[in-house]
Amino acid sequence: MIIIDTDVLIEILDKKSEKGDVALKKIEDAGEGVAITVFNLHEIAYGLYKYGRDIIKEIEQMEILGYTRDDAILSAKLELECEKRGKKVSRIDSMIASIAINRNARIFTFNKKHFQAFGNLSLL
């Protein structure tokens, strides 16, 4: 499974974005199921509502992965491990990473540096 990060999703939803077209082709070529997390949904919904737009039906049709107790525990451990190594990470990124790790999923992001601190995480 591929979890699409918000930055990639924004480009894909922008029908004029060549970067989005390339990203969509990469996802299609991978031949895996795709999803977003509840946190990506929040970020996309916030951006749309901020600019007076409604949720796009493509978003409503996507699989949305929730955040479980196991994800919360792993996320806290990941964040603390990074902190001990002197690597500052975003709490939301650690939450998204935990969802991916617990589901053996890969994250497709253009911001690879946000997720590289989580060593056992697969990126596309």
Image (cartoon, rainbow, N blue to C red):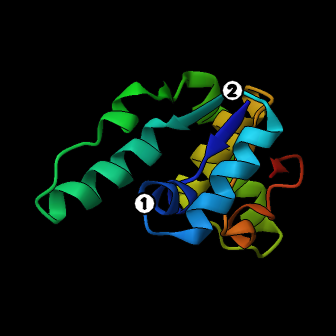
The answer to the question of whether label 2 and label 1 lie on touching residues, with beta carbons closer than 8 A, is: no
Give whichever of 50, 26 is nearer the camera: 26
SS under mark 1: loop
Say whether residue 117 is left or right of residue 96.
right
Q: Which residue is mark 2?
A: 33
Q: Indicate the position of residue 10 as horizontal and vertical percent values.
A: 45, 60
Q: Within the image, what quadrant is residue 89 found in?
A: bottom right
Q: Residues within 10 Å of mark 2 (few under 14, many from 20)?
A: few
Q: Residue at x 61, y 69 (%)?
A: 19
Q: Residue at x 64, y 33 (%)?
A: 73
Q: Residue at x 81, y 39 (%)?
A: 30
Q: Could you say which disc has been placed on residue 41 in the image?
A: none
Q: Indicate the position of residue 35 as horizontal and vertical percent values.
A: 57, 32
Say whether residue 59 is left or right of residue 72.
left
Q: Furthest-right residue in view?
A: 120
Q: Which residue is mark 1?
A: 15
Q: Indicate the position of residue 84 as horizontal and vertical percent values.
A: 79, 66
Residue 66 in sight:
no
What amino acid is found at the position of numbered circle 2 in the picture?
Gly
Q: Is residue 41 above or below residue 20?
A: above
Give whichever of 47, 38 is nearer the camera: 47
SS under mark 2: loop
Q: Within the image, what quadrant is residue 70 found in?
A: top right
